[in-house]
Image (cartoon, rainbow, N blue to C red):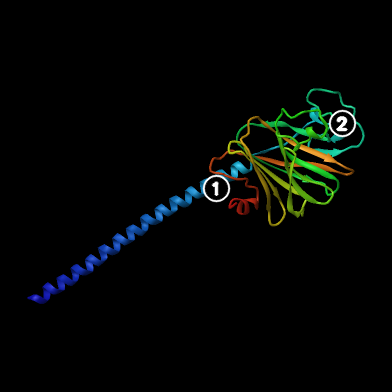
Amino acid sequence: RRVPEASNMLLDVNTASDMLLDVNTASDMLLDVNTASDMLLDVNTASHMLLDVNTASDMLLDVNTAGNDVSVSENLKTVSWSGINQRRPETPERFQDSPQVLSSRSFSSGRHYWEVEVSESGGWRVGMTYPSIKRRGGKQSWIGENNKSWCLEKIYNKMYYMIHDSIEIQFPHPSSCRRLGIFLDYEVGRLSFYELCDPIRHLNTFTSAFTEPLHAGFWVYGDNTWIHQLAQTLLENPILNIPLNGKFLDQVVQM
């Protein structure tokens, strides 16, 4: 009589084993559901990130600020050294002693990223400035030569310089490509410059508590010197901390 009881006990053990298997299977299924949910969230997040990255508009130049030593293209995207007085009318907005021009748009909040292509020859500066920068005063009205502006400069020796309030810091390596990325995080107070070669190289980040809207500023000097605006991207998604643009994503996101 004990043999059937033992058989029943064995059956109970097997049943318990099956129940345990079912519990584990259910647990695995639940894990799969949660994983799938996370994956869907990641896909949706990535989709939103790409949507933000692809929202672009042009960075146009304000010819009303252009000094008389520079030419501005008809599409308002390229500034070049002229060397011939353009005889533009004198206005409060125009730089009188500086071969430079500002963007028509200013930024007083948010994160913004754009790219420029620069000439190999001559000297140029790319940066940002408050609209209250002086329009007269010789070198003191150049971007980088006062406490109202920040810039990256390359001059004839192909070396980079970071300039703010007339303080120059030389970058230890020479320039290696003609395409640059500029990233502004207004609230955080960061202005970063990247060389868009392969691999992408972070050049410098200025930090400051910005107190006015910021315009992009472009300074050129010397024969065949020019700066061309390529693209601007507005980053509105709060989960993004830095600019993303094509292969920028994997390299810059870890900085």
Which amino acid type is marked by label 1?
Answer: Ala
Hey, which quadrant is residue 11 in on the image?
A: bottom left
Q: Residue furthest front?
A: 167
Q: Quadrant of residue 230?
A: top right
Q: Quadrant of residue 126?
A: top right
For image coordinates 71% across by 51% down, the residue present is: 196
Q: CA distance from mark 2 to mark 1?
A: 46 Å
Looking at the rendered structure, the secondary structure element under dot 2 is loop
Above or below, comparing residue 237 to residue 87 in the picture = below
Mark 2 vs mark 1: give the one in front.
Answer: 2
Is residue 157 shown left or right of residue 12?
right
Q: Which residue is mark 2?
A: 68
Question: Which residue is located at x 38 percent, y 56 percent?
Answer: 31
User: Looking at the picture, which amino acid does disc 2 mark?
Assistant: Asn
The quarter in which the N terminus is drawn is: bottom left
Question: Is residue 186 visible in this depiction of the protein?
Answer: yes
For disc 1, the marked residue is 46
Residue at the (59%, 42%) spot, across then down: 51
Q: Where does residue 46 sit, x and y in percent of width and height? A: 55, 48
